[in-house]
Image (cartoon, rainbow, N blue to C red):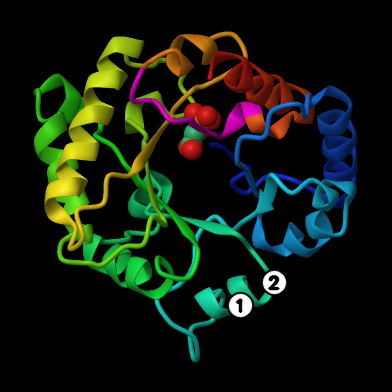
Amino acid sequence: MIIANWKCNGSKAMTNTWVNNFLTNYDETKKAFIGIAPPSIYIQRLLETELNKLAEINIGSQDIDISSGARTGAISSDMILDFDCKFSIIGHSERRQLFNETNEEIKQKILKIAKKTITILCVGETREENKNDQTRDILKKQLEVVKDIELNNSLVIAYEPVWAIGTGNTPTPNNINEIHKFIKDVVQSTSYNSEYPMVLYGGSVNQENAKSFFKEEFVDGALIGGASLDGKEFANIINIFNETN
Ligand code: PGA
């Protein structure tokens, strides 16, 4: 599973160029789940492109709100489903840090959407926490949001160390592998029906380093920010994933 998170980037013109560059470079002989999360205002536009002819390509949202109604600026889970989105990212560290999102809100969002569509829950420690050897404790705390929730194979975890996002720094592939195994075990022992989730790695993944991560046993794919803004590079990363798996 390879997911593009465009964050707050894009334009009508960029969308057209991106789709052309992607389709020219994407090798569709193997069909891993591919997700693209543009800013919500561009979802409909992407759904109307040639991408939609490829069954393995799924358009999704970068977030949902906890409910509908009097919540100016928000987008609800029902709206995302109404537009046929096939997944939603939840709990990205930028949402936690810039929009003060709490674990409690993240849990409410999971309850809204996890049974209805694929939910990619982001977790990860800060540089400070990493230096202080608190990574596992922090992840365990963030993963408490799945406690006692019944999941139906819809939950995917993205391990995104905050210090690796957009910085060019990453943990070693071996470190990532160990943390992914830890995350799978924690979710399995915490969720109501012992779900053993897929775990994606996110944080400065690009076409140069992707293979080193994809070779690891417990790395089930990637969540990609910066490098996903170039349709050609994103296609190359998917091709590398398909060759490695
Ligand atoms: P990055 O972002 O690939 O630009 O580091 C990843 C993310 O925030 O999901």
Q: Residues within 10 Å of mark 1 (few under 14, many from 20)?
A: few
The front one of 117 and 12 is 117
The front one of 55 and 203 is 55
Is residue 76 something one can see in this rendering?
no
Residue lying farthest to the bottom in this orientation? 69
Residue identifier under label 1 = 79
Name above or below for residue 85 compared with residue 167.
below
The front one of 38 and 180 is 180
Residue 137 location (% of width, % of height): 9, 38
Cα distance between the residues tagged 1 and 2: 6 Å
Q: Which residues are magenta?
A: 217-227
Name above or below for residue 243 compared with residue 138.
above
The reply to whether callout 1 and callout 2 are in contact (CB within 8 Å) is: yes
- The residue located at (60%, 59%) in the rendering is 86
Q: Residues within 10 Å of mark 2 (few under 14, many from 20)?
A: few
Helix, strand or loop at label 1? It is helix
